[in-house]
Amino acid sequence: MLKGIDQRLSAELVHVLMLMGHGDDLVICDVNHPAASIATDTTYGKLIDMAGCDIPTAARAILRLMPLDSFVPAPITRMQVVGDPTAERPVFARMQAVADSAEGAPVQMQSLERFAFYAEARKAFAIIRTGDSGPYGCFILKKGVIDLPEL
């Protein structure tokens, strides 16, 4: 273990976050998402599990380390409810609250139709599957930059 890193974040997940660059996408999903099959198409190529976490807990831990992209209008994409693209699910508001808190300001979130979401997820850097029972707990987070001091 290291100081300041949430114990829910495995060494593998911290490694993936460090490998990601500005503009790379990270999928955080529930247990219903076809994460294992989609993960093989991602840059990382394999699934990372956070089985003991729900979506908000996993996102909170990840967003303590990973900034969201401030150069795009909506750095988070969620899956639309099938048959009712304007429908809201409780997990949407919970994720919104976590993102707003992590960034210290309101974060825009956009939505995609189910199969369009799957197509975008395949282009992601990596997929994190949580133990969240869902449904519709499927989010793509675009990594931002950190203004670091010069070495």
Image (cartoon, rainbow, N blue to C red):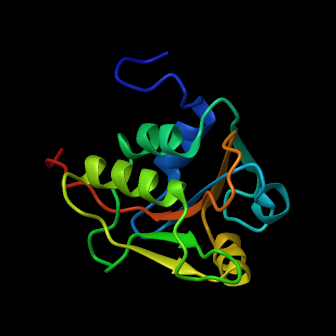
The location of residue 25, given as percent across then percent down, is 52, 66
Q: In the picture, which quadrant includes the C terminus?
A: top left
Q: Residue furthest left?
A: 149
Where residue 60 sits, quadrant-wise, is top left
Q: Residue at horizontal 60%, vertical 62%?
A: 125
Question: Depth check: 8 or 94 in front?
Answer: 94
Q: Residue at horizontal 14%, vertical 47%?
A: 149
The location of residue 14, given as percent across then percent down, is 52, 38
Relative side of 107 to 89, left or right: left
Q: How many marks?
A: 0
Question: Depth check: 110 or 87 in front?
Answer: 87
Relative side of 37 to 72, left or right: right
Q: Residue at horizontal 27%, vertical 47%?
A: 101
The location of residue 132, given as percent across then percent down, is 66, 43
Where residue 87 sits, quadrant-wise, is bottom right
Q: Residue at horizontal 37%, vertical 76%?
A: 74
Question: Depth check: 65 or 97 in front?
Answer: 97
Question: Depth check: 105 or 128 in front?
Answer: 105
In the displayed structure, would residue 67 be above or below residue 74?
A: above
